């Protein structure tokens, strides 16, 4: 049987271990947060000056709430930022005096990166689709190829129109030019000819692009 002293000692050790575990978890979380914030700040735009990098004699300072705080020395501005546990960021270096804003730069860069990611996601990438014609294409096939090309154009893509010349067809490039001309005219309301029809080896190529928005 443990003595009262032994029991108190054992309970004290268990309590100490519990405190150490909790302290360790807190310090780990704090360390991860500091690393994240430093990584965000470390990815700042080239030429953007923050905190101690700002050494101008005088600055026009804007508070974190957008309020004009007036003109002051860079030292005083940095002290204000540090009091609020925020960063001093130069946002208008060409102004006289330069304009700085007090903000959480890590949070600002994180939100900016999110906006840029969303913009890239919503941005349409222009693809080049191909429509292949033949020298003696019939009306039905011509209209089918035309509808496909217009569908691509309406989606914002460019269209490469091609004709492959086989055997003796090489002796009649004018027929290919006439087919290309008819195709371009049929797309005229929604597309422009970016590159006119040109014979390259055994292939005649023409490029169409969507008409620019007025």
Image (cartoon, grey):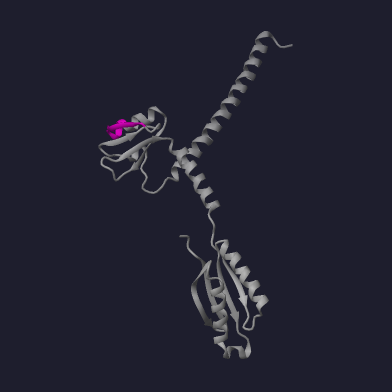
Where does residue 64 sit, x and y in percent of width and height? 40, 32
Report the magenta residues as a range.
67-76
Quarter occupied by the N terminus: top right
Q: Is residue 203 above or below residue 75?
A: below
Where does residue 193 sit, x and y in percent of width and height? 50, 72
184 vs 5, left or right, is: left
Where does residue 8 sit, x and y in percent of width and height? 65, 12
Identify the image quadrant of residue 126.
bottom right
Q: In this view, does 41 lie above or below 185?
A: above
Residue drawn at (47%, 63%), measured in percent from left and top? 212
Out of 36 and 60, give the one closest to the viewer: 60
Residue drawn at (54%, 57%), measured in percent from left and top? 124
Residue drawn at (53%, 82%), measured in percent from left and top? 199
38 vs 19, left or right, is: left
Q: Is residue 75 magenta?
A: yes
Q: How many labels does the image show?
A: 0
Extreme-top residue of the structure: 4
Q: In this view, does 39 lie above or below 31?
A: below
Where does residue 70 sit, x and y in percent of width and height? 29, 32
């Amino acid at each position: 049987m443990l003595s009262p002293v032994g029991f108190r000692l054992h309970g004290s050790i268990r309590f100490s271990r519990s405190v150490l575990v909790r302290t360790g978890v807190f310090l780990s979380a704090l360390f991860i947060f500091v690393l994240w914030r430093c990584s965000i700040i470390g990815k700042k735009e080239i030429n953007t000056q923050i905190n101690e990098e700002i050494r101008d004699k005088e600055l026009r300072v804007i508070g974190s709430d957008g309020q004009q705080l007036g003109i002051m020395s860079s030292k005083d501005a940095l002290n204000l930022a540090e009091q609020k546990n925020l960063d001093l960021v130069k946002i208008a270096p060409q102004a006289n005096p330069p304009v700085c804003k007090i903000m959480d730069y890590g949070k600002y860069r994180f939100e900016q990166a999110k906006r840029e990611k969303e913009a890239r996601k919503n941005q349409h990438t222009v693809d080049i689709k191909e429509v292949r014609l033949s020298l003696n294409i019939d009306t039905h096939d011509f209209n089918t190829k035309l509808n496909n090309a217009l569908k691509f154009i309406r989606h914002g893509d460019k269209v490469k129109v091609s004709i492959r010349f086989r055997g003796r067809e090489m002796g009649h490039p004018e027929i290919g030019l006439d087919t290309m001309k008819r195709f371009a005219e049929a797309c005229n309301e929604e597309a422009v000819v970016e590159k006119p029809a040109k014979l390259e080896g055994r292939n005649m190529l023409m490029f169409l692009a969507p008409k620019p928005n007025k």
